[in-house]
Amino acid sequence: MTAARAARLGAAARASAWAMGSAAAAATGLVGYQALRLDVRRQWARAIELPPLAAYVEAPSVVEGDPVPVRVHSTAPYRARLDRLGHGVQDTGWRAEGGACPQAPRYDHWRGCQWPVDLVVDAPGLRSGLHVLTLDQTGDPRQRFRLPLVVTPREPRRVAVVASTNTWQAYNPFGGFSNYLDTASPHPWRYVKAALQVLNAHVVVGDRHTVPAAPLPLCRPNLALDADLADLEASPVADGSHLVKALWPLLAKLERDSVDAGLFSDHDFAFDHRPTSAELVVFAPHSEYWAEEMVGRLQAYLHTEGKVAFLSGNNMYRRVRFDERALGVVDQRVDGAAVAALLGVAYDAAGYQSYGGYRVAASDHPFLRGLGVKDGDVIGWVPPSEAPTSPLAGFGASGWETDKLHSASGELTVLAVGTNASGPAFMVAKPTPGGGWLFNAGSVAFLPWIAVDPVLEGLVSRLVELALEDRSAGSEE
């Protein structure tokens, strides 16, 4: 990054909402919410039933080369191996074994588990990327648990990929709580909590926690991700992944194309300079849960020459707060007008879990130029008639949850529109205040399809090429 750009980025960051405090942040319309504040502190701990094997790491990401402490619960001796998900499943060669280490079933719904470290992944040659740690019990390999490790580079890379780690936490039901499931609260409170969530009403407990969205502790095994990674041989498209596996096709492509890319967590994007030092920032599938700091970082980055690609949908739909050991969901529905003004499109529930392809609307745009398509062509789609030969028949890249044009969308180009019967995704390109650009696919289903649709794969290649070419040209000048 040039000194001039670094200065501009620093100046923009100082002027952004996250740096200026809550009053300026509320002016964005993305971070304000109403709450009844009660000066009460509460901890809730209880005994829960643990599975035979489970594990977690406390941090959402680790730096390449650093040892990774892993907290394990196992009722029997276990084995561990580490793989990297890039161009295929890559065996790192790291192996370990551990004895039975059953943990106490006490679980704190504010702070999570407090298990001791039983395993350390000490692989000095670990490269930035998405790794999977697999544990299985020695006497019964059917007892298996998998967890992803987001390994970040020590230095900034030209392309920064931001994994949707906040969304990963929100879907984790361990201990009876996720942002979608509550089997732990007493029955009367469950109904009150559900009503408050529907009304998007909040009660702040002390200065740290927000009810009804009880904090989602970081220190606990992630059952949703274990299930998502259960079959590494299955296609992310065929099994409908929107979490870890949905990210894999992008990482595989960047590696095949020898792109200088680094992987980061949502927390890294909020608090670390490395992601926003990149020439292109890519947000991965289902980038739904955003903190004030993340919004501010993005606003600052867009006021520089930065380029941004949202290969996702349902973007920036909920607001979260990073607590010391938990993720607090403090707003269940962020204002769509503010999101559209920033990202070009915003989510609503129309067309939920419907699927279609994208009908091209601007084939002469630089993002689509040279990809062999013309206006009216449909891309990212397998028609139902191909059901006998394709497991993807009836599915498409515009789907699951989709983002649409809004009266606040501002200046942009509609590149393509989903063919869904209702609520189609709008794929858009938007100029940014700093002279860069923002691409938004507007669909949760989009990213896995780059593994099966050559036009969508080519589109991602074009985004990377244009972002890096723009910077190279600027450096030569």
Image (cartoon, grey):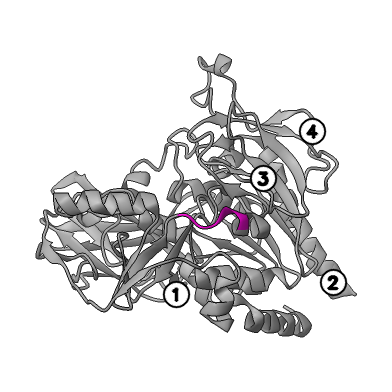
Indicate the quadrant containing the C terminus: top left, top right, bottom left or bottom right. bottom right
Q: Is residue 101 visible?
A: no
Q: Choose the circle earlier in sequence order: 3 or 1.
A: 1
Q: State how far apart marks 3 and 4 are (Cα).
A: 23 Å
Q: Which mark is residue 474?
A: 2
Mark 3 lies on residue: 405
Q: Position of residue 319 (x, y in %)?
A: 46, 62
Q: Is residue 25 magenta?
A: no
- What residue span does the magenta drawing correspond to? 333-337
Foreground mark, 1 or 4, reads 4
Callout 1: 10 Å neighbours few (<14), some, many (20+)?
A: some
Residue in the image at 30% along x and 54% along y: 178
Horizontal side of 85 relative to 196 (left or right) equals: right
Give the amino acid at mark 3.
Answer: Leu
| Residue indicated by mark 4 | 373
Nearer-N-terminus badge (2/3):
3
Residue 412 visible? The answer is yes
Residue assigned mark 1: 65
Name above or below for residue 467 compared with residue 456: below
Task: Kindly identify the amino acid type of the residue bearing the numbered disc 2.
Answer: Gly
